[in-house]
Amino acid sequence: MNPNTDVTAIKIVVLISGNGSNLQSIIDAIAERNLNAEICAVISNKQNAYGLQRANDHGITSHWIDHKKYSSREQFDQALIKAIDPYKPDLIILAGFMRILTEAFVGHYQGKMINIHPSLLPKFRGLNTHQRVLEEGDSEHGATIHFVTPDLDGGPTIVQARLPVVAGESAEKLAEKVQRLEHQIYPLVVEWFSERRIRLDQNKVYLDDNLLPANGFDFIA
Ligand code: GRF
């Protein structure tokens, strides 16, 4: 069955700012695994985000909402809500969306907005995670998918995927390896949502009604 015509398919809106390789992994998984999910729209705050091209290539509606046109975060976030809500999404996916979101925005989508972060949270919140991992001399690194809460990069974890850090490797190489993991775990989590297996309750994450540990489901590549 074409998921686009199935009323039980979950509706997704994806927010991006750049390349959109994670968006691509989700587009591909929906097509290949026939997930019961539909990406209704892709929204970018950057006009030249390659992810917008990816959306267009797959016939997905895209929007560019320039944050620079708004005098405050609150106003930008309200414009985002206005663009998102008509789609009545079940799930909002942040995939390289490089904006700090207001509490009002986050609260509006509580329990249905997720983010991917290139580190084993709570380690290395924020930017330049790969370089910082190398500087700290950590022996492992990875990616985390978590529910979004007002605590930046601090919401309850759904999944973590880890890899060993090889001595002497560059931040670029490490980034590449982490992205390969990201492209496996984001589609998996979307699949879980499409099967209604994941929920957030009182800041805790449940998979099939089982409480997940604080570092989420341990994904083995
Ligand atoms: C990913 O590494 C993700 O963890 C981070 O931003 C990057 C986005 O990459 N939040 P892409 O645009 O999906 O290629």
Image (spheres, rainbow, N blue to C red):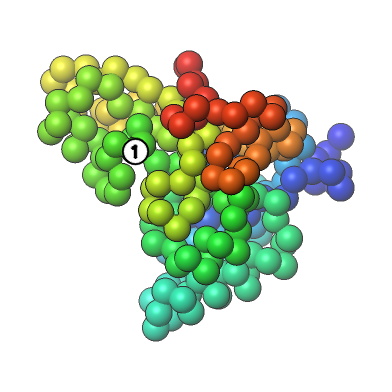
Residue most toward the front? 202
Residue 140 versus residue 4 in the image, above or below: above
Residue 183 locus on image (x, y percent): 49, 31
Residue 179 locus on image (x, y percent): 40, 32
Q: Residue at image x 53%, y 34%?
A: 158
Q: Is residue 115 visible?
A: no
Given residues 37 and 47, the one toward you in this image is 37
Would residue 85 appear left or right of 80 to someone viewing this image?
Answer: right
Identity, as a three-letter code, of the amino acid under mark 1: Pro
Residue 46 versus residue 112 in the image, above or below: below
Residue 196 locus on image (x, y percent): 73, 36
Which quadrant of the structure image shows residue 32? top right
Would residue 206 appear left or right of 121 to someone viewing this image?
Answer: right
Q: For label 1, count other residues whose C-alpha is less than 10 Å away and answer few (under 14), some (14-19) or many (20+).
A: few
Ligand 1 within 8 Å of the CB at mark 1: no
Q: Residue at image x 70%, y 51%?
A: 90
Q: Residue at image x 27%, y 40%?
A: 124
Q: How many marks?
A: 1
Which quadrant of the structure image shows residue 198? top right
Residue 220 locus on image (x, y percent): 48, 16
Quadrant containing the N terminus is top right
Residue 139 versus residue 146 in the image, above or below: above
Q: Secondary structure at mark 1?
A: loop
Q: Is residue 88 visible?
A: yes
Label 1 sits on residue: 122
Q: Residue at image x 48%, y 53%?
A: 149
Given residues 210 and 37, the one toward you in this image is 210
Would residue 118 appear left or right of 85 to someone viewing this image?
Answer: left
